[in-house]
Amino acid sequence: MAESSTDLDFLAGVRVVDFTQFEAGPSCTEALAWLGAEVVKIENPRTGDPGRRLRPGQPDDDPYYFHMFNANKKSITVNLKSPLGLEIVKDLLRKADICVENMAPGTIERLGLGYDEVKALNPRIIFCQIKGFGTGSPYEKNLAFDMIAQATGGTISVTGERGRQPVKPGISLGDTGTGMTMAITILGALRKRDKTGEGCRLQVAMQDAMLHYMRTNFSTQAKFGKAVERDGTRSGGGTNGPSGLYPCAPGGLNDYVWIMTSRGNPEHWSRLCKVMGREDLIDDPRFNTPTLRVKNDAELDPIIREWTQTRTKHEAMALVGGAGIPAGAVLDTMELQNDPSFVERGIMQTMEHPTHGGFKMPAWPVRVNGKPPKVKASPILGQHTGDVLHGWLGLSAAEVESLKGEGVL
Amino acid sequence: MAESSTDLDFLAGVRVVDFTQFEAGPSCTEALAWLGAEVVKIENPRTGDPGRRLRPGQPDDDPYYFHMFNANKKSITVNLKSPLGLEIVKDLLRKADICVENMAPGTIERLGLGYDEVKALNPRIIFCQIKGFGTGSPYEKNLAFDMIAQATGGTISVTGERGRQPVKPGISLGDTGTGMTMAITILGALRKRDKTGEGCRLQVAMQDAMLHYMRTNFSTQAKFGKAVERDGTRSGGGTNGPSGLYPCAPGGLNDYVWIMTSRGNPEHWSRLCKVMGREDLIDDPRFNTPTLRVKNDAELDPIIREWTQTRTKHEAMALVGGAGIPAGAVLDTMELQNDPSFVERGIMQTMEHPTHGGFKMPAWPVRVNGKPPKVKASPILGQHTGDVLHGWLGLSAAEVESLKGEGVL
């Protein structure tokens, strides 16, 4: 089989000093690494990024989370509380194009590495900060994790069953969703920096970034003049029907298919009737316009369910989708993990890690000339300390060893 | 009040030919527009982007969806089925840096504007395609909307209440989430193109992009060896406690607060006990380790609920968050729409539209030197036909009028 991934050099020569931890920051810098930037994690010598060890004080039996968000990066250890360690990091910042951090509010400034200090060291740098809440927000000093961003950013309020309690979207959008908006802005800023030599300060708050992913909800609110209510087994606008989740055989927790007939394409409805062997419904006066199908869904849904419940979700998707109607089986994480199509197309790749062996994970999903970028191992803590300090700052192996002995690295 | 937004010129001079429609494509090109690119929508003269008219055949009383995803862009009308119209678009492509489309599978090729044709016209172009399913997938010819991507990409399977049916995350991640991954890759590709003169082809599938946002779920699966089950009122990993949604006064649909105590920071627990006036619980043998708090959550949750139910969600967030414990009120779309903090910080801005008046909407969430980019009006259909054909191709006003008369524009 031909190689299904490629080494990308889009950002060859771009140097990133990466102070990020957990996911919101690391997902951003990892995107840069996949596109070919040299991303150097600055980690404390004792434990490193806390995303490496989700069970403090216990053995690290869970490196998967760290692999996911730190592929293709380098790691160096520096003790930022040592004056010499701080000087070394400042020297790295002088050589960097981009610096990214997502520490707790105020931490980077207390380290003496706030924007004003770093700009004075390197006016060309793009200095990037990811926080839970925005500067100027009443909550700007508060701590946040993904779920806090999703609560205060609105995504939880629109998710769940109609009339029941809300639930968190099962994905970590508060983290990775935020990281993506920062990565886009960094790459825009870099283009200007390349032309003018002028760096800048970029800031994003996880709460604010959630609004960006909720714009369809805000447009629904603008149309109806009231807060959007959740109705998670139907489509959002409430204007297309039938559109929703229908149960399939054999009735397991994820045996559902989403079928979507669009009011924009009247053929979806007639095609669906034909697939179900119910041509008689096409012109049924209860259902023969999109508005009527939404209005009379209490009568229509049982008819569709009756058909879907005699098919598996895969059969239903193949039959309905194959007839030109948007349809999708609800796939769980294990079904996705084991689907050979993702491996063949390079969307799932196996990270070969020197101590943790092979780890199959989603790669960057965009293909470049037919192939996604190749996933390389996440770094062992401090794996590249010698290489980077030599390559960027010219330190010798003996100097690095000596600094390690002094507790600086 | 000082201006809270700024005109960004990060991508000044970058020309984008934009064939996108609805959301997955437009969210991508809009990000480029906010960063200063000249994004020109190519629309059919009769109805334009179907996102302009979500109710075909009926008056357009719902322009909000279109505004959300097309701010700061230009619009020209061209009849792509007219040979002369097609030639004009080819001339535009010769002058463009980037071209993006998200039509149904096979459509752009049938128009004679597939990658090979466009590359022959302009080898420097970055040619971008967004589809529901990937080239090489068994479903590559299938149609998809947001909900189909979320069903087949796994996000629905992990969202919902424990043991109950799945629900769709209430946000259109299948669309905007996909658009963000393409925007990042485009900006990476542009940097290389600027250096080498070499364009490329970029492709992303909405199903594949969902995996990128589910990586925390895949890491949980790797740890436990089974498909991730939904449990939308608790945090994902099941290893932090207490962490989840707790009901607040007065008991409305969105009167909840998410409280998250991390096992990585043992002080979260003791601080929470103090906020609740329950110092007696700190060393309670049922709850005095993170593992015990998860194990005995059936005893612990009612204690926390008893406290939260006597506070509003805002009070609970202020008290718990203010004590240094991650906490977030569940805010609905109207509360977010009316929160003055977003306006003061430029995160919500009012689009001044010549025919639809003022429309308040989320702007790009990343601040550049303290300010997000300024939102400008979405284009009226064909508003910039004359300007762009003159500016890019040198056509005179008379020529443009004549082509309009012939049904070409």
Image (cartoon, coloured by chain):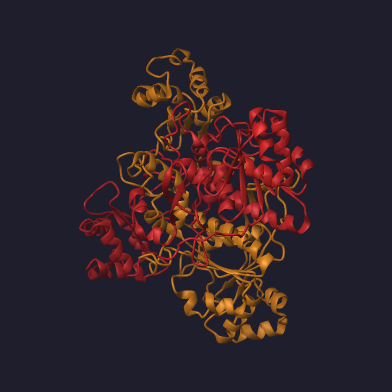
Chain colours: A orange, B red
Residue located 59% across and 55% down the image: B36
Compared to residue A241, the image places residue A86 above or below, namely below
Left or right of B266 on screen, residue B355 = right
Quarter of the image that includes the C terminus of chain A:
bottom right
Q: Residue at x 42, y 28 (%)?
A: A241
* Residue B285 makes an appearance in the image: no
Task: From the viewer's side, name the closer residue of B45 and A103.
Answer: B45
> Residue A210 at x, y = what percent?
45, 53
The percent position of residue B236, horizontal first and vertical second, equals 43, 53
Placement of A279 over or under B344, stated as above or below: above
> Which residue is situated farthest in the top direction here?
A280
Q: Position of residue A190 (x, y in %)?
A: 64, 63
Q: Nearer the viewer, residue B84 or A338?
A: B84
Name of the residue lying farthest toward the front: B398
A16 displayed left or right of B120: left
Q: How many marks?
A: 0
Answer with the quarter of the image where residue A8 lies: bottom right
Determine whether B215 is above or below B99 in the image. below
Residue positioned 57% across, 29% down in the render: B46
Q: Position of residue A1 (x, y in %)?
A: 75, 43
Say whether residue A65 is visible: yes
Q: Quadrant of residue A123?
A: bottom right
- Give the side of residue B334 with respect to residue A365, left or right: left
Q: Nearer the viewer, residue B86 or B313?
A: B86
